[in-house]
Image (tube, helix red, strand yellow):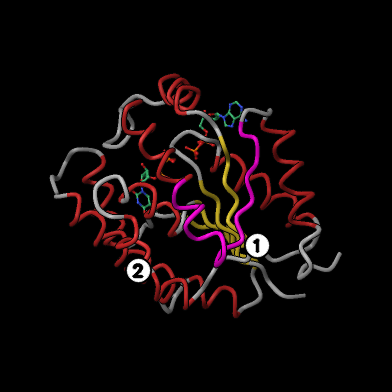
Amino acid sequence: MKPLFIAFEGIDGSGKSSQVKLLAEKLTSDGHKVYTTFEPTDNPIGKMIRSVFSHKMVADEKTIAGLFLADRFEHLLNQTDGIIKKLAEGYTVITDRYYLSSYAYHGVHMPVEWVIEANRLCAELKRPDVNIFIDITPEISMERIAQNRANVELYETLENQKKVYAKYKEAIELVKNQEIIKLFDGTKSIEDLGSDIYQYVKQLNSISY
Ligand code: ADP
Ligand code: TYD
């Protein structure tokens, strides 16, 4: 069985983390080796990014885009638990965010084509077998964030989420010939959405059940 590389995408609060966890549990109980991961990472560059998001550090939007690119290279290539190493070890890797997030979030501040070009080497190193986009309106996602977060992070305003959502849709159109992107209805319950995603992943050719 070929291990899969699955990227979850969506605006903040769309339900990615919940679905990464559910899918990992289902695939693991089917007997697959599963490794879950996320961006920004826990590596030093990811930590620097998080300090910008929590307002402990200030950085220009272009700097932030550059930090995410460096964090992604480290995520892919680090020798301890990088994505490429984990896939080679036979793990199906599920990541909470990958380069589509950069297209959407940084595309708000600079030309999206530039962001796509800057990430080209990442795509060449490892393109997801599927990008799972959890589709939810910015209004609903902001309601969820308001209910669940004590602190509002840098990009978590309704105005910005609307821009990011529009950029996601624009970027999906731009890269649809290079990427496999599957949209799911994020307004379903966690369980129903989880079973839609699981059914989809199960029928992907490269996983044999
Ligand atoms: P993300 O990782 O995209 O920010 P989370 O999975 O952390 O999203 O979900 C954000 C909040 O919304 C959490 O409190 C979670 O319990 C809730 N949530 C997630 N998925 C759903 C859903 N399908 N329906 C209702 N609430 C959800
Ligand atoms: P994350 O912790 O996944 O937030 P959430 O759980 O709310 O979705 O991501 C933190 C923030 O990082 C989120 O606002 C999106 C942003 N981000 C970028 O701006 N560029 C990127 O390339 C990535 C991967 C994330």
Q: Position of residue 175 (x, y in %)?
A: 50, 60
Residue 117's tag is: 2
Residue at the spot x=78%, y=67% of the render? Answer: 207
Q: Position of residue 28 (x, y in %)?
A: 73, 57
Dot placed on the residue nearer the N-terminal end, 1 or 2: 1
Closer to the eye: label 1 or 2:
2
Question: Is the distance from the Cβ of mark 1 to the nearest ligand 1 atom less than 8 Å?
Answer: no
Q: Quadrant of the N terminus?
A: bottom right
Amino acid found under the numbered disc labelled 2:
Glu
Residue 43 lies within the magenta run: no
Report if the CB atoms under discs 1 and 2 are less than 8 Å apart.
no
Question: SS for tag 2?
Answer: helix
Residue at the spot x=24%, y=62% of the render? Answer: 66
Q: Residue furthest right?
A: 209
Question: Is the distance from the Cβ of mark 2 to the nearest ligand 2 atom less than 8 Å?
Answer: no
Q: Is residue 72 left or right of residue 3?
A: left
Q: Quadrant of the C terminus?
A: bottom right
Residue 164 sits in which quadrant?
top left
Above or below, 97 relative to 169? below
* Front residue of this view, candidates 182 and 97: 182
Residue 34's tag is: 1
Q: Position of residue 147 (x, y in %)?
A: 45, 19
Tell me which segment is drawn in magenta. 170-186
Residue at the spot x=65%, y=41% of the render? Answer: 184
Amino acid found under the numbered disc labelled 1:
Val
Residue at the spot x=39%, y=26% of the render? Answer: 149
Residue 177 sits in which quadrant?
bottom right
Task: Give the Cα separation between the discs numbered 1 and 2.
Answer: 30 Å
